[in-house]
C-alpha cells in the first residue's frame, strides 16, 4: 500500500487531530503517502484533497477540533444534486473512483455512528475502509470510551464549578443542559464529578414532583443553591422529549434542546425559588483535548492504519478496558445506553443520595 486517505466527519470533538497526526507520522515512516479529505463528505464528493506531511501535523495533537474540517449534514449516498435542486444523488461510486484515480488504496474515516454508517457503504462499494469512533456522547457500541468523551466531561465539570459560585451568591437553582442525545453518559459523569445535586438522564423518566421536592429540601437546608445536570433528551414521565428543531437533510434529523429552560421555569413556578437555565452546548466539544483523549485517539489511529496495511478492512477499531478491539461495520445504528444495573458511577451517586428524579 503506497497511498491512503483520511477524513473526519460529523460533529467535531477534542482528540481528532491526535488521530490525524498518528496516521500521518506512522504512515510516512512506512513509506505511505497520506491524503487528507477536507470538510468530511463534502470533500469526499467534491474532490477537496490535500497531502498531509510531517510539517502539516506538527504539534496538532494539542489542538481541538480537526485541521481537516468536518460536516455533519452531508451523506455521500444521499447527496444534494447541483443540477436538480431539491433532489439527491448517490455519489459514492464516482467519489471512490476519483480517489483511486490519484492512487488511494485505502481510507480511514473518523466519525460517529452516522458517519461510520456511510463508511460502511463506501467499503461495500470497493474502497477498503476502516472506521475510528468519536463522539462526546460516548454512545457507540464500538468503543468505550469514544474519542472526545473525556475532554467533554472535563469541559462540563469546569463550567458547572463556575456556575456554583454565582448560584451560591444569589441563592439560585441552576439547571445545566448537556449534550449526549439519548445516552446519559456525558450528563452522569459530568454531573457526578461536578457535585450536582440532581442528575436527570434519558434512561430514567423523571417525576417533576420528586425533582421539586428535592429542590425544596436542599434550599430549606443550610445549602444556598441547587445544581441540576440534565441531559438534552431527558423527559418527564408520560411526556415526550424537548425538540429544538428538525433538520431534514442531516444524519441526525431530530435535534434535542430546550429542556433546561422548560424545567427551570417549572421549578421556579412550583417551588418559588429563583431558577436559571444554562445550556452548555458546543462548549462541551471545544478546546484542547485532555491527555486521555490524545492517547486514545493515537492508539486507535495507529491500529486502524495497521489494519489497512495488512489488508484488513470493513471494521471499526475501538477500546474496551484499555484494550484495542475491532468489530465489523454494523448494518444497524444503535446507541449504547447506560446500564443502570451495572454502571458504578450511577450506583455510587445513588448511594450518596444524588437525586435522579424517580
Image: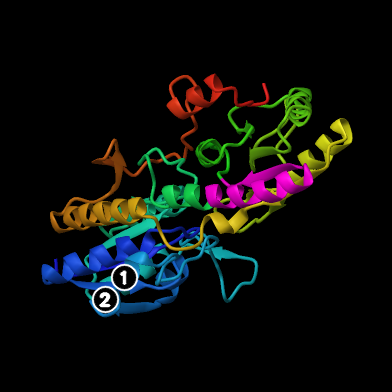
Specify the quadrant of the image occupied by residue 101.
bottom left
Pointer 2: residues within 10 angstroms few (<14), some, or many (20+)? few
Vertical placement of residue 102 versus 322, above or below: below
Q: How many marks?
A: 2
Magenta residue span: 156-179
Specify whether 260 is left or right of 306: right
Question: Which image quarter: residue 326?
Answer: top left
The answer to whether residue 29 shows anywhere in this view is yes
Label 1–label 2 contact, CB within 8 A: yes
Q: How is the image coloured?
A: rainbow
Q: Quadrant of residue 130?
A: bottom left
Q: Secondary structure at mark 2?
A: helix
Determine which of the numbered discs, if any, sits on residue 97 in the image: 1
Secondary structure found at label 1? helix
Q: CA distance from mark 1 to mark 2?
A: 6 Å
The rendered magenta stretch, by its main secondary structure, is classed as helix
Q: Which quarter of the figure is the N terminus placed in? A: bottom left
- The reply to whether residue 258 is in sight is no
Question: Residue 97, how many percent across, how many down?
Answer: 31, 70
Q: Is residue 109 above or below residue 188?
A: below
Residue 157 or residue 326, whichever sits in front: 157
Disc 1 packing (10 Å; few <14; some 14–19; many ≥20): some
Q: Position of residue 67 (x, y in %)?
A: 40, 72
Apparent side of residue 88 relative to residue 86 in the rendered image (left or right): left
Q: Nearer the viewer, residue 318 or 2?
A: 318
Amino acid at each position: 500500500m503506497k497511498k491512503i486517505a483520511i477524513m473526519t466527519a460529523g460533529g467535531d470533538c477534542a482528540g481528532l487531530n491526535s488521530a490525524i497526526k498518528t496516521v500521518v507520522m506512522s504512515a510516512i515512516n512506512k513509506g505511505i503517502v497520506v491524503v487528507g479529505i477536507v470538510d468530511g463528505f463534502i470533500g469526499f464528493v467534491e474532490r477537496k484533497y490535500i497531502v498531509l506531511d510531517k510539517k502539516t501535523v506538527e504539534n496538532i495533537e494539542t489542538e481541538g477540533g480537526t485541521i481537516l474540517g468536518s460536516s455533519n449534514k452531508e451523506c455521500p449516498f444521499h447527496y444534494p444534486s447541483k443540477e436538480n435542486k431539491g433532489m439527491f444523488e448517490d455519489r459514492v461510486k464516482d467519489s471512490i473512483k476519483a480517489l483511486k484515480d490519484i492512487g488511494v488504496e485505502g481510507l480511514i474515516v473518523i466519525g460517529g455512528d452516522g458517519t461510520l454508517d456511510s463508511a460502511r457503504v463506501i467499503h461495500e462499494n470497493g474502497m477498503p475502509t476502516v472506521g475510528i469512533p468519536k463522539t462526546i456522547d460516548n454512545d457507540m457500541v464500538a468503543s468505550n470510551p469514544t474519542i472526545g468523551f473525556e475532554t467533554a466531561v472535563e469541559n462540563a465539570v469546569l463550567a458547572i464549578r463556575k456556575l456554583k459560585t454565582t448560584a451560591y451568591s444569589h441563592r439560585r437553582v441552576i439547571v445545566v443542559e448537556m449534550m449526549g442525545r439519548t445516552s446519559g453518559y456525558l450528563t452522569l459523569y459530568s454531573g457526578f464529578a461536578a457535585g450536582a445535586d440532581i442528575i436527570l438522564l434519558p434512561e430514567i423518566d423523571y417525576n417533576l414532583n420528586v425533582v421539586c421536592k428535592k429542590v425544596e429540601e436542599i434550599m430549606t437546608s443550610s445549602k444556598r443553591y441547587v445544581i441540576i445536570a440534565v441531559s438534552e433528551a431527558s423527559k418527564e414521565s408520560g411526556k415526550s422529549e424537548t425538540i429544538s428543531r428538525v433538520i431534514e437533510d442531516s444524519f441526525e434529523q431530530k435535534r434535542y434542546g430546550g429542556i433546561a429552560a422548560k424545567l427551570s421555569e417549572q421549578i421556579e413556578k412550583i417551588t418559588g425559588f429563583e431558577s436559571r437555565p444554562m445550556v452548555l452546548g458546543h462548549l462541551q466539544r471545544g478546546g484542547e483535548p485532555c491527555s486521555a483523549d490524545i492517547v486514545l485517539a493515537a492508539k486507535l489511529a495507529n491500529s486502524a492504519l495497521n489494519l489497512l496495511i495488512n489488508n484488513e478492512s470493513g471494521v471499526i477499531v475501538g477500546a474496551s478496558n484499555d484494550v484495542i478491539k475491532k468489530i465489523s461495520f454494523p448494518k444497524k445504528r444503535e446507541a449504547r445506553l447506560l446500564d443502570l444495573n451495572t454502571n458504578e458511577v450511577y450506583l455510587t451517586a445513588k448511594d450518596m443520595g444524588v437525586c435522579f428524579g424517580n
